[in-house]
Image (cartoon, rainbow, N blue to C red):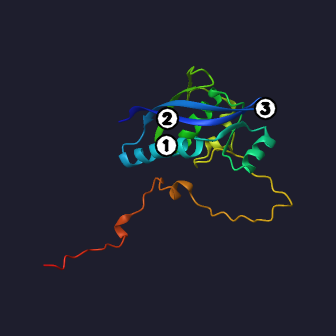
Amino acid sequence: MSARVTKDFAFHAGLYYEKVFLINTYHVRLYMDVKVEDIIIQNIALDRIKHLFSSELDNCIFVHETNKIVIDNYNKAGLKVCTLPEEPYDQIISLVLLKKINSITDNKLFVNQIKISSMISDDVAFYVSHEDHVEFWDRPVAWWTNPSPCITDWVKKQTKKDKIVELKKDTNAWTDLGLSWKQKDCSTDNEIVFLNLDK
Protein backbone atom coordinates (compact mmCIF):
# COMPACT_ATOMS: atom_id res chain seq x y z
CA MET A 1 0.00 0.00 0.00
CA SER A 2 1.41 3.41 -0.92
CA ALA A 3 0.43 6.68 0.68
CA ARG A 4 0.72 10.23 -0.60
CA VAL A 5 2.21 12.81 1.76
CA THR A 6 3.32 16.45 1.63
CA LYS A 7 6.06 18.20 3.54
CA ASP A 8 6.98 21.90 3.63
CA PHE A 9 10.49 23.32 3.90
CA ALA A 10 11.90 26.83 4.02
CA PHE A 11 15.50 27.92 3.63
CA HIS A 12 17.59 31.03 3.01
CA ALA A 13 20.15 31.17 0.25
CA GLY A 14 22.12 33.60 -1.80
CA LEU A 15 22.14 33.67 -5.56
CA TYR A 16 24.49 35.15 -8.09
CA TYR A 17 22.65 36.52 -11.13
CA GLU A 18 23.82 39.00 -13.77
CA LYS A 19 26.87 40.01 -11.71
CA VAL A 20 24.73 40.75 -8.65
CA PHE A 21 24.62 38.87 -5.34
CA LEU A 22 21.11 38.61 -3.87
CA ILE A 23 19.68 37.07 -0.71
CA ASN A 24 16.51 35.04 -1.06
CA THR A 25 14.07 33.03 1.06
CA TYR A 26 12.58 29.90 -0.51
CA HIS A 27 9.45 27.99 0.44
CA VAL A 28 9.18 24.46 -0.91
CA ARG A 29 6.35 21.96 -0.69
CA LEU A 30 7.09 18.35 -1.66
CA TYR A 31 4.32 16.05 -2.87
CA MET A 32 5.55 12.50 -2.29
CA ASP A 33 4.47 8.89 -2.64
CA VAL A 34 5.63 6.57 0.14
CA LYS A 35 7.04 3.52 -1.67
CA VAL A 36 8.07 1.37 1.32
CA GLU A 37 6.09 0.02 4.26
CA ASP A 38 9.00 -0.05 6.72
CA ILE A 39 8.49 2.99 8.99
CA ILE A 40 12.20 3.11 9.88
CA ILE A 41 13.17 3.38 6.19
CA GLN A 42 10.49 6.04 5.69
CA ASN A 43 11.92 8.07 8.57
CA ILE A 44 15.49 7.72 7.27
CA ALA A 45 14.37 8.93 3.84
CA LEU A 46 12.62 11.93 5.41
CA ASP A 47 15.66 12.68 7.59
CA ARG A 48 17.85 12.66 4.47
CA ILE A 49 15.57 15.25 2.88
CA LYS A 50 15.65 17.35 6.07
CA HIS A 51 19.45 17.19 6.07
CA LEU A 52 19.58 18.32 2.45
CA PHE A 53 17.52 21.42 3.23
CA SER A 54 18.90 22.33 6.66
CA SER A 55 22.59 21.46 6.31
CA GLU A 56 23.37 21.64 2.60
CA LEU A 57 21.00 24.16 0.97
CA ASP A 58 20.42 26.57 3.85
CA ASN A 59 22.86 29.50 3.51
CA CYS A 60 24.33 28.24 0.25
CA ILE A 61 24.82 30.37 -2.87
CA PHE A 62 23.19 29.32 -6.13
CA VAL A 63 25.48 30.00 -9.10
CA HIS A 64 25.29 29.03 -12.78
CA GLU A 65 28.01 26.41 -13.31
CA THR A 66 29.60 28.43 -16.14
CA ASN A 67 30.56 31.26 -13.72
CA LYS A 68 33.78 29.48 -12.81
CA ILE A 69 35.68 32.48 -11.44
CA VAL A 70 32.74 33.44 -9.20
CA ILE A 71 32.38 29.86 -7.94
CA ASP A 72 36.10 29.62 -7.23
CA ASN A 73 36.09 32.93 -5.34
CA TYR A 74 33.09 31.91 -3.20
CA ASN A 75 34.77 28.58 -2.44
CA LYS A 76 38.00 30.35 -1.45
CA ALA A 77 35.95 32.52 0.91
CA GLY A 78 34.66 29.33 2.58
CA LEU A 79 31.07 29.72 1.35
CA LYS A 80 28.83 26.83 0.30
CA VAL A 81 28.13 26.95 -3.42
CA CYS A 82 25.36 25.06 -5.19
CA THR A 83 26.11 24.90 -8.90
CA LEU A 84 23.17 24.97 -11.31
CA PRO A 85 22.94 23.95 -14.97
CA GLU A 86 21.21 27.25 -15.81
CA GLU A 87 20.69 30.65 -14.18
CA PRO A 88 19.27 30.41 -10.62
CA TYR A 89 15.58 30.81 -11.41
CA ASP A 90 13.11 29.19 -9.02
CA GLN A 91 12.03 26.67 -11.67
CA ILE A 92 15.61 25.50 -12.24
CA ILE A 93 16.20 25.14 -8.50
CA SER A 94 13.01 23.09 -8.15
CA LEU A 95 13.97 20.84 -11.09
CA VAL A 96 17.36 19.96 -9.61
CA LEU A 97 15.80 19.53 -6.15
CA LEU A 98 13.18 17.10 -7.47
CA LYS A 99 15.85 14.97 -9.11
CA LYS A 100 18.22 15.23 -6.14
CA ILE A 101 15.63 14.27 -3.54
CA ASN A 102 14.56 11.22 -5.53
CA SER A 103 18.26 10.27 -5.77
CA ILE A 104 19.03 10.60 -2.06
CA THR A 105 15.87 8.76 -1.01
CA ASP A 106 16.49 5.99 -3.54
CA ASN A 107 12.83 6.53 -4.53
CA LYS A 108 11.67 5.20 -1.15
CA LEU A 109 9.89 8.54 -0.82
CA PHE A 110 9.21 9.51 -4.41
CA VAL A 111 8.68 13.19 -5.18
CA ASN A 112 5.97 13.55 -7.80
CA GLN A 113 5.77 17.31 -7.70
CA ILE A 114 7.45 20.32 -6.12
CA LYS A 115 5.89 23.69 -5.45
CA ILE A 116 8.43 26.47 -4.96
CA SER A 117 8.08 30.15 -4.23
CA SER A 118 10.55 32.79 -3.11
CA MET A 119 10.76 36.32 -1.86
CA ILE A 120 12.49 37.56 -5.03
CA SER A 121 9.78 36.09 -7.26
CA ASP A 122 7.19 37.96 -5.16
CA ASP A 123 5.98 34.62 -3.73
CA VAL A 124 4.64 33.49 -7.10
CA ALA A 125 4.53 29.70 -6.85
CA PHE A 126 5.92 27.42 -9.55
CA TYR A 127 5.02 23.74 -9.87
CA VAL A 128 7.41 21.16 -11.30
CA SER A 129 6.51 17.51 -11.88
CA HIS A 130 8.63 14.38 -12.28
CA GLU A 131 6.83 13.97 -15.61
CA ASP A 132 8.46 17.15 -16.91
CA HIS A 133 11.57 16.46 -18.94
CA VAL A 134 14.61 18.69 -19.10
CA GLU A 135 17.84 17.89 -20.91
CA PHE A 136 20.15 18.34 -17.95
CA TRP A 137 18.38 15.50 -16.10
CA ASP A 138 19.97 13.13 -18.60
CA ARG A 139 23.55 14.00 -17.69
CA PRO A 140 25.42 10.81 -16.81
CA VAL A 141 27.32 12.53 -13.98
CA ALA A 142 25.74 15.39 -12.04
CA TRP A 143 25.28 16.19 -8.36
CA TRP A 144 21.48 16.03 -8.67
CA THR A 145 21.68 12.36 -9.70
CA ASN A 146 24.29 11.53 -7.05
CA PRO A 147 22.76 9.79 -3.99
CA SER A 148 25.19 11.57 -1.61
CA PRO A 149 24.29 14.88 0.09
CA CYS A 150 26.57 16.93 -2.25
CA ILE A 151 25.16 20.04 -3.96
CA THR A 152 27.92 20.80 -6.46
CA ASP A 153 30.12 19.18 -9.08
CA TRP A 154 32.77 21.85 -8.64
CA VAL A 155 36.32 20.66 -8.10
CA LYS A 156 38.81 23.16 -6.68
CA LYS A 157 41.54 24.06 -9.13
CA GLN A 158 44.98 22.96 -8.01
CA THR A 159 47.80 25.45 -8.46
CA LYS A 160 51.55 25.22 -7.96
CA LYS A 161 51.08 27.10 -4.68
CA ASP A 162 48.91 24.31 -3.29
CA LYS A 163 51.28 22.23 -1.17
CA ILE A 164 48.71 20.33 0.85
CA VAL A 165 47.84 16.81 -0.19
CA GLU A 166 44.37 15.84 0.93
CA LEU A 167 43.67 12.18 1.55
CA LYS A 168 40.00 11.27 1.40
CA LYS A 169 38.46 8.18 2.87
CA ASP A 170 36.07 6.43 0.56
CA THR A 171 33.13 6.48 2.92
CA ASN A 172 29.42 6.79 2.58
CA ALA A 173 28.35 10.23 3.80
CA TRP A 174 24.92 8.94 4.83
CA THR A 175 26.52 6.28 7.01
CA ASP A 176 28.66 8.95 8.67
CA LEU A 177 25.47 10.95 9.34
CA GLY A 178 23.68 7.90 10.77
CA LEU A 179 21.27 7.86 7.82
CA SER A 180 22.23 4.71 5.95
CA TRP A 181 19.51 2.27 4.88
CA LYS A 182 21.26 -0.53 6.78
CA GLN A 183 21.14 0.27 10.46
CA LYS A 184 23.83 -0.84 12.88
CA ASP A 185 23.00 -4.11 14.60
CA CYS A 186 22.92 -3.24 18.29
CA SER A 187 22.44 -6.87 19.38
CA THR A 188 26.21 -7.42 19.47
CA ASP A 189 26.90 -4.39 21.67
CA ASN A 190 28.23 -5.03 25.16
CA GLU A 191 25.72 -4.71 27.95
CA ILE A 192 26.50 -3.00 31.22
CA VAL A 193 24.40 -4.20 34.13
CA PHE A 194 24.15 -2.08 37.26
CA LEU A 195 23.46 -3.99 40.44
CA ASN A 196 21.94 -2.55 43.57
CA LEU A 197 24.34 -3.69 46.29
CA ASP A 198 22.44 -1.99 49.13
CA LYS A 199 20.12 -4.98 49.60
Mark 1 surroundings: few (<14), some (14-19) or many (≥20) residues within 10 A: some
Residue 129 found in image quarter: top right
Q: Position of residue 50 (x, y in %)?
A: 49, 43
**Quarter of the image that includes the N terminus:** top left
Where residue 21 sits, quadrant-wise, is: top right
Rendered view: 12 above or below 43: above
Rendered residue at 54%/41% (across/down): 53
Q: CA distance from mark 2 to mark 3?
A: 28 Å
Q: Position of residue 15 (x, y in %)?
A: 68, 34
In this rendering, position of residue 45 left or right of residue 162: left
Q: Are marks 2 and 1 in contact (CB under 8 Å)?
A: yes
**Residue in the foreground of this view, choosing between 184 and 119:** 119
**Front tag of 2 and 3:** 3
At 52% from the left edge and 54% from the top edge, which residue is drawn?
A: 174
Q: Is the Cβ of the residue at disc 2 closer than 8 Å to that at disc 3?
A: no
Nearer-N-terminus badge (2/3): 2
32 sits to left or right of 198: right
Along the horizontal axis of the image, is 77 left or right of 177?
right
Q: Secondary structure at mark 1?
A: helix
Q: What's the residue type where badge 3 is placed?
A: Lys
Return the residue at label 3: 19
Q: Secondary structure at mark 3?
A: loop
- The amino acid type, in three-letter code, at marker 2 is Phe
Q: Which residue is mark 1?
A: 50
What is the three-letter code of the residue carrying label 1? Lys
Q: Is residue 164 above or below residue 37?
A: below
How much space separates mark 2 and mark 1, taking CA atoms?
Answer: 8 Å
Query: What percent of the width, then of the height, locates residue 118?
Result: 58, 26
Dot placed on the residue nearer the N-terminal end, 2 or 1: 2
Which circle's residue, 1 or 3, is located before the other in the chain? 3
Residue pointed to by mark 2: 9
